[in-house]
Amino acid sequence: MGVVVFCYHKIFPKKSYDVNLSLFQKHIKILDSFYEVLGLEELKAYLEGLYKPKKPGVVITFDDGYADNFIYAYPILKKYKKKAIIFPIYSRLLKEDIKRPTLFDYWEGKVSFKDLYKPLGAGEANREFFEKGVSYDFLSFEELRSMLDVFDVGSHGLTHSKTFIPSKPIDIYSGKNYHYSLSSIYNPLKEGLPIYPSKSDLSHPKAFITDEVYELLEKNKDKNLIDVYTKSLKLDFETENQYRERVRYELKASKEGLEKALGINIISFAYPFGDMSDILKEEVSNIFYMAFSTKKKPVYPHQDRYDIGRVIAVKDIFTFIKNIIYYPTNLYKYFNK
């Protein structure tokens, strides 16, 4: 049998597009009754063939490092004595010493439930970060340190941003088709700019955005901009050496920054947006012991440590139950022969 790794992002206090508090507690109750939840050390031993879970095995992970992970998820996990792994984006973490009330404070009658922090959506939080340089929807280092009795910590990179990849433009930015990754590509971001297919800038060489694109926009506002950019704009990209050096710097900076701030050894990495490449995987393997993708597959002993699959945790309880039955058992192997 394999081990299934679940990937969470945010926990909302009430019903939302992502997992809410009530549903998350149901997830943990189910796991507490029928599964063994592995922490990072148990997973490491399992990968090396040195540990066999007594029940079907599950690993809980959280990506990005949102404040609600501390306020809502951490108390539930601690209540049920479950371990988890969190992969914060280093640049998003708050440097100031703040520690917000959590469910523990609510349970103890120190605050009302409505006084607990109400999280933004993931897109809103990241947009706020790129536009203002800070978003309080992310964890502070002090909050992250307070979670170390439950959470092991890995790296999710330094910037968690995207780059355009070689292709023809597929759309024109109108304001309505905003994705926060555009704020990491264009500065300033203006309506009328071209949108190309994009990937994590750790998995692909970065596109250089020059004044040429803004000049084309100003001169051709009344024309078919897709045609203008297709015919007149050629994006330049990093060389392989430039790309490797940037990736190496970002991986090391995120690892060393977390280690210095938390006083722990960081051995795991989660690929931003789940995007991988041979070069990124090679550089990751030189710095970390293991790395997590978002490929939907279980984990097995002695497998490739730099392609550990994960299943996105969804807000449909029936899909969650299906996943915890399907992935850790031999059903996955049976249907994927």
Image (tube, grey):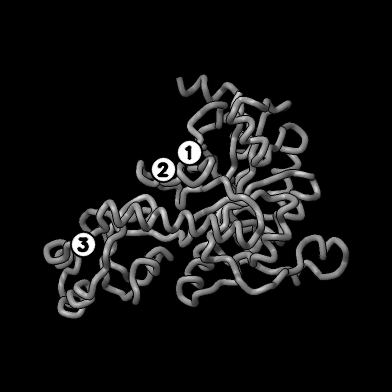
Which residue type does callout 1 highlight? Tyr
Identify residue for label 1.
Answer: 306
Depth check: give the residue in front, 100 or 107: 100
Q: Quadrant of the N terminus?
A: top right
Q: Position of residue 273 (x, y in %)?
A: 45, 51
Depth check: give the residue in front, 90 or 115: 90
Position of 187 with respect to 119 (left or right) is left
Q: Quadrant of the C terminus?
A: top left
Of badges 1 and 3, the one in the foreground is 1
Q: Residue at x 49, y 75 (%)?
A: 133
Task: State whether residue 250 is above or below residue 39.
Answer: below
> Residue placed farthest to the bottom in the image?
218
Residue 235: which numbered mark, if any? 3
Report how far apart the C-alphas of labels 3 and 2 lie in the structure.
25 Å
Label 2 vs 1, first from the N-terminus:
2
Q: Residue at x 27, y 68 (%)?
A: 209
Which residue type does callout 2 highlight? Lys
Residue 281: which numbered mark, if any? 2
Q: Residue at x 66, y 68 (%)?
A: 118
